[in-house]
Amino acid sequence: MRKYGSCGFMSIGIQAGIGPIKNWSLAGEESYPQHEKINGENVLKYRTKRHGCMYCPIACGGTVQVKDGPFKVEEARLPEYETIQAFAPFVMCDDIEACFKAQELCDKAGVDTISCGHVVAFAVECFENGILTLEDTGGLELRWGEPKGIIELTRQICEREGFGGEVLADGVKRAVERIGRGSEKYGVHIGGQEPAFHDFRYEAPSRGVTYISDPTPARHERCSGGQLLQLKMPLGPYPEFQPFDIPEGDMDALGRLYARGSKYYSAFSSCGFCAYTLGASSHLDVISIIQGFAGWDDFTAQDFLDAGERTHTLRQMFSLREGLTFDKIQFPPRLVEKPIFEGALAGKRNTVDFYEIRRHYFAGYGFDPDSGKPSKERMEELGIGQFYV
């Protein structure tokens, strides 16, 4: 992380199959053999300076510059994994300078690169299959691996101009509604949110469960605590933070494990800890840190989990109150399909029932297994009963 930042994981992600390719339709090194062009070593050739959060010893950030060419960039933020995935493998490009340009455009406009990459890939696939024509796009030809058209479309989205601004700028869900004509086959969103570029079909199931169960759907970091626990990694030196054995087929125990990890991550994130340190959390005594900073000498590991549960429960109740019910949070057709994949994990695709695990995950929180609604009694125990609706 210190040397490359998260862009050092590009090749690993492609080789393992967790980095989705061509709008989630492909996976693995054979589908994208040119991954070294977008990996950390090549990215660092353009880095002009490095930076990090205050007092961070890792300093994984930085700035990049492209001195000339069609994607000239005076100064842009060093792109991380998600951005490079969005504008390289996901649209079948291998021009790292185009990724820098996309980063610059999105940053200046305040546009999320994950969402932008999804809607661009969606448009390219619609164009490829005749759903969109040159007449629709204002003469802009959209092809896989053609960076000029992809960057021009990104510019239109960011500046709300032309086809990109009128049809795509509000994300995949709205674009599908505007285009119609069977385009939903290629539109990837979960509850209206484009998912991060981590293919849960080739990972521990916690990622997929989180994509369809979090009150803000498709978030990739929220599964991290449960993922580590399932890998038998403790989240700290306290009994409450330890993994436990899951008998084969015991969905109730798996749901409780994921709920424990989710509570931990909610509190961990609320404290402002960097997600990149979570993998080392078994050596991180967050309780002593909080006691020292806040002066809460009697603060315990269970208090920490309760704080995380309180935060997550409030988020859950807010989303339900606003109408984001879980019957609306489903995997789109593309994510139900098996991607074409030959590589390290070929044949190892998850075959679990993510919706069934979601029921047990909700139960692990004490929520209604079907609706995901928190219980009034538990909210009162957490001191937030006044927010029950």
Image: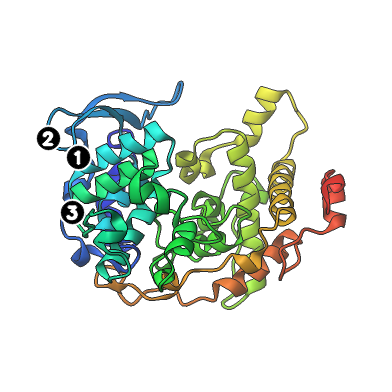
Three-letter amino acid code at the position of disc 3: Glu
Tag nearer the camera, 3 or 1: 3
Q: In the rendering, at what x and y percent does residue 283 appear?
A: 52, 40
Give the class, few, some or many, for how many residues have Cα within 10 Å of label 3's Cα (few <14, many ≥20): some
- Location of mark 2 (residue): 69
Residue drawn at (62%, 29%) of the image: 289
Three-letter amino acid code at the position of disc 1: Glu
Mark 1: secondary structure: helix
Q: Quadrant of the C terminus?
A: bottom right
Residue drawn at (37%, 28%) of the image: 59
- Location of mark 1 (residue): 97
Q: In the rendering, at what x and y percent does residue 82 appear?
A: 37, 47
Give the class, few, some or many, for how many residues have Cα within 10 Å of label 2's Cα (few <14, many ≥20): few
Considering only vertical position in the picture, is 237 above or below 167? above
Instruction: Report whether residue 230 is seen.
Output: no
Three-letter amino acid code at the position of disc 2: Gly
Mark 3: secondary structure: loop
The colour scheme of the drawn protein is: rainbow
Residue drawn at (46%, 21%) of the image: 54
Please report contact status of discs 2 and 1: CB closer than 8 Å, yes or no: yes
Total count of labels: 3
Q: In the rendering, at what x and y percent does residue 49 appear?
A: 27, 23
Q: Earlier in the sequence, mark 2 or mark 1?
A: 2
Q: Quadrant of the N terminus?
A: top left
Task: Kindly report the distance in space between the C-alpha atoms of the residues bearing marks 3 and 2.
Answer: 15 Å
In this view, the residue in front, 152 or 34, is 152
- Location of mark 3 (residue): 146
Residue drawn at (22%, 46%) of the image: 39
In this view, the residue in front, 160 or 50, is 160
Q: Earlier in the sequence, mark 3 or mark 1?
A: 1
Q: In the rendering, at what x and y percent does residue 208 appear?
A: 50, 64
